[in-house]
Amino acid sequence: MSEVVYEETATMIAAGELQSFVPFGRDHCRNHPNAFNLQLRELQPASELWSSDGAAGLVGSLQEVSLQERDRECWQLRKGCVGVREEDVEFEEELYAAGNVVVWSQGSRTHGSNVYKAFTVDSPVQQALWCNFAVPHNKKDEEEVEQTVCIVQSSCVNVHTVTGKDFISPLPFQVLNVWATKFGILLERKNAATDGQLCPPGEPLPTMFSMLHPLDEIAPVVCKPAGQFEGSHVQYVSDSTMKIVFSCCQPSIVVSYDTVQGIHSVWALRKVTQDERSTVLRCPPEPVGTPLGLMASGFLTSHLRNISRLDSSCGSGATGLGPGVGTSCAVGPGSPLHYSALHGHQNRIITSSPGINSRVHSPSISNMAALSRAHSPGMAAPSFSGAARFNTSFHTPSPRGHHGLLPSPNSTINETMLMPEMEPIVPDLCMEQLWSETVTAGCHREMSSQASKVFLTSDLCENDYLCFLVESHQQLRCVKFIESNDTSQLIFASVTTIPAKDAEPLQNIDAMLVLEACGSLVLYTGITRVSKVFVPGLLSPTFSLTNHLPHLSTPLENVSTPANAGSRHLQRLDEAAMPSPVSELRGPNMKHHEASFLEDYSFQQTTPYIHALRDPVCNRVTLELSSGLMLRISIPEIATSELVRKCLQAIRFILPKEAAMKVLVKWYNIYNAPGGPSAHTEWNLFVTCFMTLMGYNTERLTWTRNLHFEVPLSPVIAAKKARPSDGGSDEDWDYLLGSHYHRQMNSQPVCGPVDSSGSNTTITANLEDQSFASSPSCPSLKLDSSAPLFPHIPALFYVLHLLYQELQLDELQRGRASSLVCLLQQLARDLQLEEYVDLYWRDYPSLISDFTESCLIDQALIGQMQRPSFLRADPPCVFSWLSSCLRGEEIPPFPYLPSICWRTRLLVLSYALYIIGDENATSTDVSKYLVKLSAGQKSYVSEPHYRRQSSVKVKFSGESLPEQLVVWLTSEGFTLKDLDSVPFGVALPIREAIYRCREQPCSDWSEDVCLLIGRQDLTKQAHKMTLAKSKASVGSGLSLEPPATTEADEEEDGMSDIIQEVTGLIWSQDLRVQEVRRLLQSSRPVRVSVVHLPEVSDHEYIEEKENKLLQLCQRTMALPVGRGLFTLFSYHPVPTEPLPVPKLNLTGRGPPRNTMVDLNSGNIDVPPNMTSWPSFHNGVAAGLKIAPASQVDSAWIAYNKPKSPELANEYAGFLMALGLNGHLTKLATLNIHDYLTKGHEMTSIGLLLGVSSAKLGTMDMSITRLLSIHIPALLPPTSTELDVPHNVQVAAVIGIGLVYQGTGHRHNAEVLLSEIGRPPGPEMEYCTDRESYSLAAGLALGMVCLGHGSNLIGMTDLNVPEQLYQYMVGGHRRAQAGANRERHKSPSYQIKEGDTINVDVTCPGATLALAMIYLKTNNRSIADWLKPPDTWFLLDFIKPEFLLLRTLARCIIMWDEILPNTEWVKSNIPQIMRGTFDPSEDINMETMAQAQDYITAGACMALGLRFAGSANSDAFDCLYEFARTFMKIMSFSGTAAVQTGYYNLQTGLSMILLAMSMVMSGTGNLKVLQLCRFFHKRTGGEMNYGFHMAHHMALGLLFLGGGRYTLSTSNSAIAALLCALYPHFPAHSTDNRYHLQALRHLAVLAAEPRLLVPVDVDSLKPCYALLEVTYKETKWYDETTVELMAPTMLPELHLLKRVKVKGPRYWELSVDLSKETQHLKSILSRDGVLYVKLRAGQLPYKDDPQGWKSLLASTVNHRSSGVRAFKPEAISTFTSEPALVSFAEFFCKTSEGMKHREDTLVLFSAMLYECVTQECPEMLPTYIAIEQAVGALCRGDLLQTFPLWQMRLVVELWDSRILRGPANHHDALLTSEFLPVMKNMVDVALDSWLKDNSLVLRSYMRGEALSKNAQSVMLACFLVYRSIPCLRNTHTQLEGCTSLGDLLSRSSQLGIPLRDLLRLVPVLLGSAVGTQTLSGFPLQAY
């Protein structure tokens, strides 16, 4: 662009809101206790680590902070983006750094500033910046962005995130600068001259590094320079001459500066591709591409260095390499040597290659290649430049003869060989060169210095520019750039320079503020100068200032401004043209040189002037004055009124860019002139400006003249500009304005009456109207064809017409449409577009009929206008388009402006989709319904960019039309708020679609869709869903806080977190939860009541009491196992507090005096270590309270570690619990190692089991290693024997089973199989508690091969089932296979087993292993191995306990045969025990009785597992019956009980009880609770610790997780339950012989949340709701549907087809599980909260259990019509919507003033009733609008026809619904008789008008001019409602009709509906036939 477009010379705009500015951080720091006050801080190691001089510690860093350091402050501002402010508050954030303190504050104009965060670091802050790091999320590709502040110190970078994480990254080198980028931060290394010694001379170190996250390694950046030869060449950035001057995230670019060549380059920053990475790391031996490791693309100069080296014709060339080596270089950048060298060559270069792109012609490419090879083969690519630079003479002043200093090629090679190979670091980011300055621009006068400012800006026409300020030239260089089509690449176009001393961008007004050298502020948009900016209170500096300055030092005149650029750029530069370089000695950052030369020439100005700009945010910027003050100003926006803004958008869209820019700039100047107009006159000003630009003389048009009269021009301007104009040339705006004022002053008396009438829309200016109307051809009304916009009038008119149509579709904007219509009708008249004028008259009859003038356009000039092809004669009218759509007529596509007519597009396509029913309307068929307007300016319209974005992915798969419509509208960003502003007639179809979707929504719609259809319940649900995806929500949505308990001692029982609100709904009738708490509490002393018999001595009595207490303590110690299950996952810990663990209280109180009874008194023997396992269980119980969704981290887990060693067991349990709820994976490996090395047995057990549970089935290698160390069998045979405690080995073996669960891992299976039969070792090892180890190995083997059955891949040679069978029944031991042969060579010295298998040890493990491997496989052959023997002889050989296990194993293998009835249970008992006994046989009755009982117990156990968590009533009844039977047997102390033995009976009973609680898990069944309570009370005799544990586990399972959890029957769950409920319970609290106690807690792994809690979305309280649950069909039952009252436990999800919330109380909601269960699973996992919404008129079940109080029920009782019985007062019981309640309050109650409007009140009540009962409260406004429209029509006080348009659309929709037949009637919205009544009233009103005024209609049809009376309004109403087209051109056809048929045939092509045509019959035929004949025509019939 060679000239600055459309320069406005004398214009000026005013800046608003002047404030003095002081950085907030500065004040804050004054009161901040920074480093000086930190001396009291102890010398902690941190300061030694990070302070810059290491050892000196804090003292050192204090000495460093001298006073100057603290004064060096810096700050930056940005637009606020963090914090919890509302979106509409615009605020600024400031990051201030000084000394050691960084302050981050926020503040807006309205609220003051406040500190957001403040940081103090140990050494002075070098730099502080905001940066966003991308954190990869969930191993997927999505990334979370963390907002952080980076604080750079000399030795490290501190990174603080907004969420509160802190990182410290040490820096491996001194950092020059840090830059924030899209990916992380870029670090620039400080380049010391010492680099030369550090690295081989040929290999410069990289200078730029990136850090993508504070925890990542710092990696070098690679670059890809542009140019033909370097094609794909990638190399490290190692050029020390390259400095970064700017970085930006969007687009991701970096701007760099080459200090040697003085050239700026732009680079795209992106992630490194795979092959680039490998290229760099391979370091090819042959140097590729450029021998210089230069990043600079100043390719010519770099190549010049080689030339000089090769032909050394001009030795001075070599010195060109010198400056830039680094700080120690003697040759300064200003030395004459440097310049002459550089310029000497530039002459040559410019001649040899004239254009920047002709690099191909440079003469010595082959030489270069030769040089690069000769120089140092075997060296990485960047070798040469560094060597050359370092070896260039540092000391020789003479420019000649220093070649000798260059090393010979050989020496370089040798040095390279000697250097050790260094490992390359993998790069993360790559910089790809996009553009760099041309050399000529660089050396125009001198080498340009580094840009002091770089920024991006865009202009009003959406062009983007990259601007950089070169201070040495006082230039702002603007490079225009565009995104290429694939948006990945940026294309840089022309460079424009603007003279400037400083500049800043103003983001949100598309402009930038430039400070010129003379000190004045100028506003530019892009490169177009807009105007000067007047800052009130600052005098503008004298304009003549520059003239006094000598030409030499000011580059102002010489700078290539665009005006004189052409000639300047190509001039050859002579040495003579250079000024003496000495005078120009200034460093790249010499910012204040203006000030210096002002002082030199002694212009000491008294007033301060602006000398710099800084900190732009939005449209505000800070001015730095020469006096050091700072002022904050804001630059006004281009328009405040929405209408003007929209018009400007439309203008910008249609005009060519240059014209558009002119208009916008012109308008901006007029609108923002100092003391300019206020907002309400903005439109009038715009019309005047716009029409004048089109060539109108706004003085002469009455209505525009009156507009001026409304603009009260301020006297200030009047005084300045009120001189008479010389003939109003349209250029000179301000004078024109002034002359308006002048004329108004003169014409005031004339206009007086006009003004006093006060009406500003309907101006009836009598005098002038007559004068103008009398002479329409008056010459003053001609258009000036030289006006800039004159040729574009038709196009502009058309876009404004489309904008007018858009405004009609928005209720909020429609008022503005009436202002726009005045302008449009004028243009339409002048363009002689009759039909448009008619359309405007129809819309605003009372307004338009007042305008009569038209301006003439010469026929000759009409040719000059560009009539665009899209301007049609028939005006596009959006309402008539929608109307014909409803009538089902063929319609042409509707024109729209992309991005401006958003609504038109949306509504047209909605109608196409929903009314026409074209499913592709929104995708492929858009062009059928819409035609885009193309413009001169089309390039920037990228459609999707303007859509309001929304997360909905539009997918239509067989959805109904309403669903498609709703989903599509949401995806376009259409919300309910938008819908409310759509006119009621247009919105009705959309409302109908929404209404239909609301009835049966999809369960998986997104939040936005649910919002649109008005289902808050679903919205809330969807909102929770999205929340859960992003972060595990802490208190899952519902604040189901446990109530604060009153008594202090309540707190400690560890069960206070059960959610009362939910349990109170589930078990509302009784206090069973409190009872469970009473039974399970172990934190209070027990009551020890022993009767003191007189013969017992006191001492014996005390012993007796203590013995009794010991028995009670057996029970107390077993309670925690049950408590853990009861409180499962019910608590979210506070991260700052340790977890409260209730005490395990083993004391007692003896009545009557409540004396203490203690076990430690020494009176009786107490077993040692009695409490160690119980306290472990207590720790587990406490830890299991923590919910899996809580925020738990490694630090918190370690923080809970108790101080006292006696609590170590509890902590061990706590660790295991954390593993069970999945939090232990967060524990750092270091801590795990730490805990295991302590050698504390319990901790190891807890940790190993916990970690394995957390990594269930993952085959995690690190955990496998951890476990293997503890299992001798998994270690290599030669390894040292580790002394691992036996219980830890057991835990580790189970751990292997858990980690490899279900994987079928061969090696582990093999080892575990042999471990089941591990023989006892020679010494004492492996001899004690062998049973538990063998069992553990069996369970682990079962878990590894869980459910694989016979498909164990690759294990056939192991013969697993046969081997297990042998372990089960006995036989010869096989030789040990594999690695462990050595171990078992010598037999045990303690235990004589011989070579047979010890079945007592191996049987349980082997049995359960078989059961788990063949679980649910129904493999009959394996099952038959497990049948109990059927002869007495064989029965004697089997322990009765093993019969229990075998029966259990057999039943769960034959899973599908388990039936819930007693017959099935009994069928497991062998035949011989069921028949009659022959007394002669010798039968051991004891054996028989025991066998029967154990087999029964085993079968019951299997039944419990099969129906776990199902609450199956048959299974429960069956089990309950057996429990009763066993209890009966126990209660007679008769024969049977004696035979079976109490212990065996009790074991069987415990198993049955556990089976029952498994079936009823989580339901809290009362019968089971009674049984548990019964056993709880029995403490004496044989009731040992283990039985108590069993009974209380049963109680815990019954109330699992407080009723929120139940058991699953998945394979994994069954395995966990088999481990946990192993039927051999410990005899006392230290007994682990048969089964490790810790495994009891694995039952947690079988728990899953299946409680569904309906929550009322309005009150957020849990409530009752009716659910309908449909089961899938199975082989046992057909598809069945049951009704449940929620909150309830759902059955297992894989059994269900559908879950549905059933009406009539609540809105229906259906979750279809046949498609996917994930949705419901996630609901259940978050407390099962399902949001429901009451229907209007319904009450919740709690308040109205029978449903008799509802609104509809009451109407039935009264037997009167519903409306009459409906009392508006009662509304609040039916709906919670405040709008409806208030409506009833104010509009439906009779009050004093409303007496006479009784009928209106009744009508309103009826509407309200209809809305409430029909469930569409949002229709109330529509009803009222219809009633108002009809009322106004009947009264005849309509001013515009808009309401009738809407009525017509409503009626047409209704008709189209009726036509489709009665079947579809129910889903229409307006069902009642309301609409027909209203329709009839309209018909009557219009017909009666027609009777009296048929002449008016007739004269309209003849096209005669209309009179200005009230009739014209009614006429327009009639024409609109009856849809009669504009008949101006067709009246001749219809007038002469003789008969009805004739009329019909003629009117067919006009498209008038028949019933409307019949209304016209009397008028049209009346003229010919006479009205009498048709007067009897029954009009009412239609």
Image: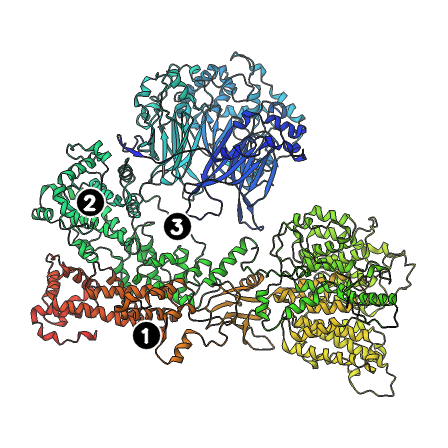
Nearer the camera: disc 3 or disc 2? 2
Disc 1 residue type?
Gly
Who comes first in sequence, dot 3 or dot 2?
2
Distance from Cα at disc 1 to Cα at disc 3: 40 Å
Q: State the residue at coordinates (89%, 57%).
A: 1324
Q: Which mark is residue 1774?
A: none
Image-quadrant location for residue 1684 = bottom right
Q: Nearer the viewer, residue 651 or 1152?
A: 1152
Q: Is residue 1442 above or below residue 666?
A: below
Disc 2 residue type?
Leu
Q: Position of residue 1226 (x, y in %)?
A: 65, 50
Disc 3 residue type?
Pro
Residue underneath mark 1: 1861
Q: Nearer the viewer, residue 624 or 1002?
A: 624
Q: Judging from the image, what secondary structure is the residue with disc 2 in?
A: helix
Q: Nearer the viewer, residue 1243 or 584?
A: 1243
Count of labels shown?
3
Image-quadrant location for residue 637 = top left
Residue underneath mark 3: 944
- Circle 1/circle 3 CB separation < 8 Å: no
Q: Is residue 1455 visible?
A: yes
Neighbour class for label 1 at 10 Å: few (<14), some, many (≥20)?
few
Distance from Cα at disc 3 to Cα at disc 2: 39 Å
Residue underneath mark 2: 707
Distance from Cα at disc 2 to Cα at disc 1: 55 Å
Nearer the camera: disc 2 or disc 1? 2
Q: Position of residue 949 (x, y in %)?
A: 42, 52
Q: Judging from the image, what secondary structure is the residue with disc 3 in?
A: helix
